[in-house]
Image: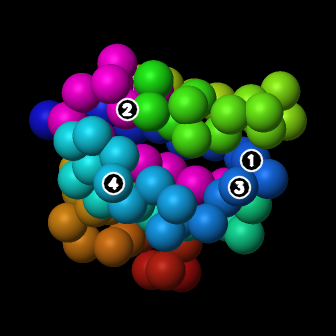
Amino acid sequence: GGDILEFDSPLSDTGLYEDAPGLIRSERPSPQRLRLIVQDLRPALTYLLEKLGSDSPQLRELVCRKMNLDDLFTMMTGRRLDNEGESAQ
């Protein structure tokens, strides 16, 4: 299991968040977007907002959710389930 914090931010360097509490993995789905997979959402969200500090108002989007089976598959294989049909064509 786990929780996901995904956001667009001026501080989207993955190295800035390596010491996030309960960090399982960090990913960069796009150049400005960062996804943190964490054990528990609350301490990681608090950490993120503290890390952003005065840049918090510039946080363009923040998604917080529980990890699902699609996320687990992607994390373990590096592929998305919805892309399988496209590659078979």
- Picture layout, residue 41 above or below residue 82: above
Residue at 66% x, 39% y is: 52
Percent position of residue 82, x then y: 46, 56
Between the residue at mark 2 and the residue at mark 3, the CA separation in whole angstroms equals 16 Å
| Element type at mark 4 | loop
Colouring style: rainbow
Q: Give the CA separation, mark 2 to mark 1.
A: 16 Å
> Would residue 3 be visible to someone looking at this image?
yes
Name the residue located 58 percent from the left edge and 29 percent from the top edge: 49
Distance from disc 3 to disc 4, alpha carbons, whole Å, reads: 15 Å
* Label 3 crowd bin: few (<14), some (14–19), many (20+), radius 10 Å: some
Q: Residue furthest top?
A: 42
Picture coordinates of residue 1, whole percent (x, y):
14, 35
Labels 2 and 1: the sequence-earlier one: 1
Residue displayed at 68% across by 34% down: 53
As drawn, 59 above or below 35: above
Q: Vertical placement of 42 versus 3: above or below?
A: above
Disc number for residue 9: 1
Report whether residue 80 is seen. no
Q: Which residues are the magenta region? A: 33-45
Q: Is residue 12 left or right of residue 22?
A: right
Q: CA distance from mark 1 to mark 4?
A: 18 Å
- Tag 1 near tag 3, CB within 8 Å: yes
Disc 1 marks which amino acid?
Ser
The residue indicated by pointer 3 is: 11
Quadrant of the rendered image containing residue 32: bottom right
How many angstroms separate mark 1 from mark 3 (CA)? Answer: 5 Å
Which label was assigned to residue 19? 4
User: Tag 3, which secondary structure?
Assistant: loop
**Residue on which disc 2 sits:** 44
Label 1, residues with CA under 10 Å away: few <14, some 14-19, many ≥20: some
Disc ID at residue 65: none
